[in-house]
Image (cartoon, rainbow, N blue to C red):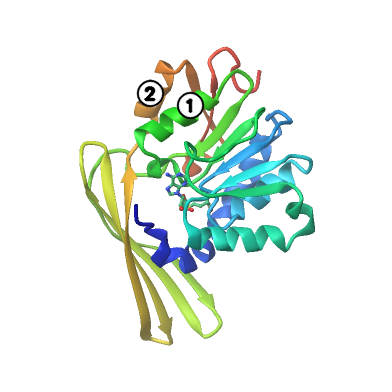
């Protein structure tokens, strides 16, 4: 399967960074309720979230699963240059079904990734959540397979250049959209580079996810500021916070 992030990897990390200013504090808080076993960072990207996990849980082992070789390069470099992370973060290629996870996983962080998972991968994730094992994830709009008009979602400066990220979505099936992305680099007013790529994304709203989870005897609990769309998923018998 081709990797859509092969073309966009150089932009993803810098464009995700401002979002992690918001995701970091609620994720840190949620992780305090996780057990002592290894934490899986699913679709870790360049490792911005992995660093939050590492700081929130200074003794935890972290398995950072990242299928894109380009983003995995960013992740590996970021982890290896930090002595506190080098010893306890393992970078794994592939997806959740192919990753060689150790026994005793205590939690899964799936930030900004759930729409990338095929139904069987989602099932694999839910099956990992035995009693005492929690997941934290976020849902991103749209919740239905609808058109999303072209929107600028990133605008940042690096040296002489300004980077813009643009995207629009179109329906691609009963539960999917295709995101058509354009990453633009400007020097002054002049567009000096443009990279485009498409992401397949399974749409998922709170109601649909809750119904799916109920079949697996899992609950969905909102956490953090509402606009971030973050949730904890866990076994019905162990309500979050109890
Ligand atoms: C928008 S990025 C988010 C990266 C990181 N979690 C963050 O929030 O900064 C989505 C990530 O999911 C990864 N990904 C795509 N398909 C995946 C799959 N089937 N399983 C796990 N990760 C996947 C991509 O390679 C990419 O790194």
**Residue 21 seen in render:** no
> In the picture, residue 108 is in which quadrant?
top right
State the image coordinates of residue 222 (x, y, percent, origin top left): 52, 31
Looking at the rendered image, the disc whose residue lies closer to the viewer, 2 or 1, is 1
Q: Above or below — where is 53 with respect to 37?
A: below
Q: Above or below — where is 114 with respect to 157?
A: above
Q: Is residue 175 left or right of residue 139?
A: left
Residue shown at 60% from the left, 55% from the top? 48
Q: Above or below — where is 223 with respect to 215?
A: below
Q: Nearer the viewer, residue 183 or 127?
A: 127
Residue shown at 41% from the left, 60% from the top? 5
Q: Nearer the viewer, residue 106 or 210?
A: 106
Residue shown at 68% from the left, 57% from the top? 79
Q: CA distance from mark 2 to mark 1?
A: 10 Å
Q: Is residue 203 left or right of residue 83?
A: left
Label placed on residue 185: none
Report which residue position mark 2 lands on: 212
Q: Quadrant of the C terminus?
A: top right
Q: Nearer the viewer, residue 69 or 217?
A: 69
Q: Above or below — where is 236 with respect to 27?
A: above
Image mark count:
2
State the image coordinates of residue 69 (x, y, percent, origin top left): 49, 59
Residue pushed farthest top?
Answer: 237
Residue shown at 59% from the left, 18% from the top? 239
Q: Mark 2 and mark 1 in contact? Answer it, CB < 8 Å.
A: yes
- The answer to whether mark 2 is within 8 Å of ligand 1 is no
Report which residue position mark 1 lands on: 126
Q: Secondary structure at mark 1?
A: helix
- Is tag 2's residue or tag 1's residue first in the polypeptide sequence? 1
**Residue 179 seen in render:** yes
Q: Nearer the viewer, residue 125 or 110?
A: 125
Q: Secondary structure at mark 2?
A: helix
């Amino acid at each position: 399967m081709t990797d859509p992030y092969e073309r966009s990897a150089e932009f993803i990390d810098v464009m995700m960074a401002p979002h992690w200013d918001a995701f970091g504090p609620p994720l840190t808080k949620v992780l305090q309720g996780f057990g002592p076993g290894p934490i899986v960072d699913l679709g870790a990207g360049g490792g911005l979230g992995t660093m939050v996990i590492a700081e929130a849980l200074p003794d935890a082992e972290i398995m950072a699963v990242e299928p894109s070789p380009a983003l995995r390069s960013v992740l590996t470099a970021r982890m290896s240059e930090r002595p506190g992370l080098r010893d306890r973060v393992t970078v794994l290629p592939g997806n959740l079904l192919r990753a060689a996870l150790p026994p005793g996983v205590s939690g899964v962080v799936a930030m900004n990734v759930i729409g990338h998972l095929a139904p069987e991968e989602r099932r694999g994730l839910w099956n990992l959540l035995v009693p005492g094992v929690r997941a934290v994830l976020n849902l991103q709009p749209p919740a239905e397979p609808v058109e999303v008009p072209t929107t600028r979602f990133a605008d940042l400066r690096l040296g002489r250049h300004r980077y813009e990220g643009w995207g629009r979505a179109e329906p691609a099936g009963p539960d999917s959209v295709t995101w058509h992305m354009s990453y633009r680099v400007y020097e002054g007013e002049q567009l000096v580079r443009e990279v485009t790529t498409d992401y397949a994304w399974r749409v998922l709203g709170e109601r649909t996810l809750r119904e799916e989870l109920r079949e697996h005897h899992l609950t969905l609990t909102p956490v953090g500021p509402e606009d971030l769309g973050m949730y904890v998923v866990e076994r019905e018998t162990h309500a979050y916070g109890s």
